[in-house]
Structures are given as structure tokens and as C-alpha cells.
Amino acid sequence: MVQRKERADALRNRQAVLAAADGLFARSPSPRSVSMDDVAAAAGVGKGTLFRRFGDRTGLIRALYEARIQPLRDAVESGPPPLGPSTQPHDRVEGLLDAALGFKLDNRHLALALEEVGSGSPYQAAHYTWWHRTLQETLERIPSVADGEFIAHALLAATRADLVEHLAGQEHMTAERMRSELAAYVSRVLPSASGSGKNGESS
Amino acid sequence: MVQRKERADALRNRQAVLAAADGLFARSPSPRSVSMDDVAAAAGVGKGTLFRRFGDRTGLIRALYEARIQPLRDAVESGPPPLGPSTQPHDRVEGLLDAALGFKLDNRHLALALEEVGSGSPYQAAHYTWWHRTLQETLERIPSVADGEFIAHALLAATRADLVEHLAGQEHMTAERMRSELAAYVSRVLPSASGSGKNGESS
DNA sequence: AACCATACGGACCATCGGTCCGCTTAGCAA
DNA sequence: TTGCTAAGCGGACCGATGGTCCGTATGGTT
């Protein structure tokens, strides 16, 4: 066998830690104000346990994030339109960005925590690479898009957690408005958003 | 009088601190690895001096940043095209974004330090508000742009320091390529990029 | 029951931003 | 030049935090 079974107490503690951390991040105004000691105390475990399980603070946040985003990831990789691979490219780009935004709106605290994680920029995180690759590939299926790399980065940047947080928090922009603003923006970037036969390019 | 003259030693120390900090940030791979103790030591002053002058870490970084960006700010507020107020809106949007990108390319360490400053998101910093307001106002002079608020945020997001750092560092994208990619992207967002008399709106 | 790999937990450590306060000195006035 | 004082200095010190270590406890197995 390649790995032993997880011990019962370990399992219990892991779940307790995840639940506690999730609650703390959700309640806290800023991820910064949630310390590892807080998490350990709230979960009723020792600090050592926490670090053994998750390696470091980043690992804990990442574990929380992965658990939350899994369904969305599945929907994108093997679900039906408007997210799955069978979606028409143009619609899928809109779908992907709307989904990314929606996810960050629904999980502001986690997305914020993950992006502002002390060690390294958000661009080194595995989940970002995945989003970017998926978006880039989809973009490049649209005829008028030759090189989707930068466009994918730029579009994803419009859904960054701290921007979302700023708009929703300081600027009091509603979720609805943000989604429609983003949709309008996307259709600016992509040609022939209306789906009519015309496109913006000659020849 | 409203304020006394700065004492000679205070002036000397202030300059020493700024020079030392600038050098350290420039050399360091990540702003995180430059501690206030490092700065104080490199400048040959005590820590107390450093904090009395700049308040806190953020204040120091901001002081460095402001000094560097002042010329650009002047060019935008009162200079000639393609940055000054007299520039045609469409061209000015392109000019502003290219300038923002260029600045971050030339001052990667500082821009990165300022954006990832522990306390608060980059969206609360005064300089961001200024960029955003300027860009929004310019955008809204373009007839087909009704609401420039979100578009301004989204476009500026494409020039974020950590994205620039990622593209230049990990992805080895040249400065030239980034600028042209950004320019192409901007012309996607804005209608009638060719500068012809046509616009996208009827009536 | 006995054994031991796994896991626990909290004392402990290093580092960092930031504060405090006794000492020094620049600048001014006589 | 001398003397005075406010401004400035600097580094010991502090509290918080992420992360480590290791003696102890326990789940699982034979």
C-alpha cells in the first residue's frame, strides 16, 4: 500500500480545525486578524497538531479554499454549459469569469486570505494557474483571439479578491451590479458579443 | 509660522534612510525580506529615528513611492500629450495605462512593496484613488463609455504590480512585449481604436 | 494484554513592527 | 564663545506571531 489509513483522532482533529478556521475567517474583518493560535484554540487542539497537518498558514488556507472550490472546478472541467468544455468559447469565457467573480463574492474571506497570503504572490498558487490556463485555452478557440495569454491574465485581474472586496465593502457595490458590470466589460473585450454574424475585424 | 525648519541632522538622516531603503528594496528579491531593522542598520541610524520620521513601515514605503512617482503625476496633471489633460480621451487612456505599466516595470520593487503592504488593500492607498479617478474621468469623455468606474478598475488591475512581476519574472515576458500586449488589450476594450471619426453609438 | 507507530499539545524560539525614555546636539541668543 | 533648550537620537525593550521540538498519550493491531 502507498499510504496508511488516517487515525481516527487525526481525522476528527482535521475536521475540527477546518471548521474552526472557516468560521474564524468568515467572522473576521480581515484574514490578518486570524492567528494560528486563534485557530488552534477555537478548534480545541494544540498548535503542533495544526502545523503538522497543514504545514504552515498557507497550507491551511489552501486546504479550506480547495474544499470550497472543488464543485466549481468540477463544473468547469466536466459539467454542462455555461461552464463545461462543451460550451461555445465566447459564452464560456463569460461563464468562467462570472463564476470566478461569483465565487469570490460568496467566499470573500477565503479568497482574500489566499491572495494576500504572505509567502509569494497569488500568481504562484496552483489554482490561479488552473484558472488562467482554462481561460486562455477557451479564449484561443475564438477566431479573432490569436494570443490569449495576456488577455486571460487581464480579465482574471478584474476579479481579484481585493478589488471585489473593495467594491463590495468600501464602494457598496451590490453583487448584482458587479456581475453585470463585469459581463459588460467582458463583452467589450471580446468581439461580436451580441452573437450576430458581424465581427469587428475586416477581411 | 506654521512649521519650524528641519534640523540639519534630521535632514541628513532622512535622506540616508530613504537612500538606504531604496537600495535595500531594489536589491531584495521580495519586499518582505527587508525589515525595518535592516533599513535602520543600512542607513546608520537608530530604529527610533526611522519610526519617528515615517510613522510606520507603510509610511516609509509611501514616502519612497511618492518621490519616484511625482514626475509622472505632474506629467499627467499638467503636461503635454500623451499624458496631460489636453490629450484626446482615447489616446490618453492608452497613455495613462502605458505609463502606469512602464512605471511599475521601472520600479518593480517599490510598486510591489506598496501594493503588498500589510495594512489594508492597495485600493485604500491615496495613489490608487488618484489613478482611478483620473482614468475614470478620461474614460467618461469617450462618448461610448457611459460608466467608467468599473472599466477603470478593471484596466488598472491589468497593471498590478504582482502581475507585472509575475510576467516579467516567472514568465520572462519582456517589457516591450508587455507594453504592446497591454496596448492591444486596451484597444479591445475601447471602441474605434483606429481613431477614425466613427463611434459605436447611434444618434 | 502488550506493543509501537502515529499523533498530540503546549512550552519554547526567532523575528518583526513598533514604543519608550535617558542622552546628545543643533541652533540660537547673549 | 558660552550657555541654554527644544528637537532629535538610538537602541533596549515589548507584545504578537509563525513555526519548531519533544516528552507524553493513544489508536490500532497482533
Image (cartoon, coloured by chain):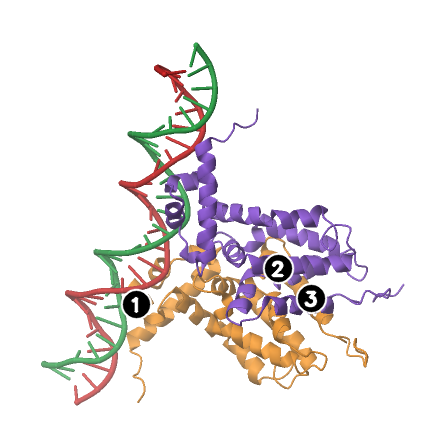
Chain colours: A orange, B purple, C green, D red
x then y, percent, for residue A46: 29, 63
B49 is higher (above) or lower (below) than A131:
above
Q: Secondary structure at mark 1?
A: helix
Residue at position x 64%, y 86% from top?
Answer: A86
10 Å crowding of disc 2: few (<14), some (14-19), many (20+): some
Among the 4 quarters of the image, the one containing residue A188: bottom right
Q: Would you say the residues marked 2 and 1 are in contact, meaning their CB atoms lie under 8 Å apart?
A: no
**Amino acid type assigned to the residue bearing label 3 in the image:** Ala
x then y, percent, for residue A66: 47, 73
Is A4 displayed left or right of A170 in the figure? left
Foreground: B179 or B63? B179
Q: Secondary structure at mark 2?
A: helix
Location of the C terminus of chain B by quadrant is: bottom right
Q: Which labelled disc corresponds to residue A49?
A: 1
Q: Which residue is mark 3?
A: B183
* Mark with earlier residue (2, 3): 2
Location of the N terminus of chain B by quadrant is: top right
The reply to the same-chain question for discs 2 and 3 is yes
Q: CA distance from mark 2 to mark 3?
A: 12 Å
Q: CA distance from mark 2 to mark 1?
A: 47 Å
Among the 4 quarters of the image, the one containing residue D24: bottom left
Foreground: C21 or A82? C21
The reply to the same-chain question for discs 2 and 1 is no
**Amino acid type assigned to the residue bearing label 1 in the image:** Thr
Q: Which labelled disc corresponds to residue B102?
A: 2
Q: Would you say the residues marked 1 and 3 are in contact, meaning their CB atoms lie under 8 Å apart?
A: no
Q: Secondary structure at mark 3?
A: helix
x then y, percent, for residue A179: 66, 66
Chain of residue at mark 2: B
x then y, percent, for residue B123: 58, 54
**Amino acid type assigned to the residue bearing label 2 in the image:** Gly
Q: CA distance from mark 1 to mark 3?
A: 50 Å
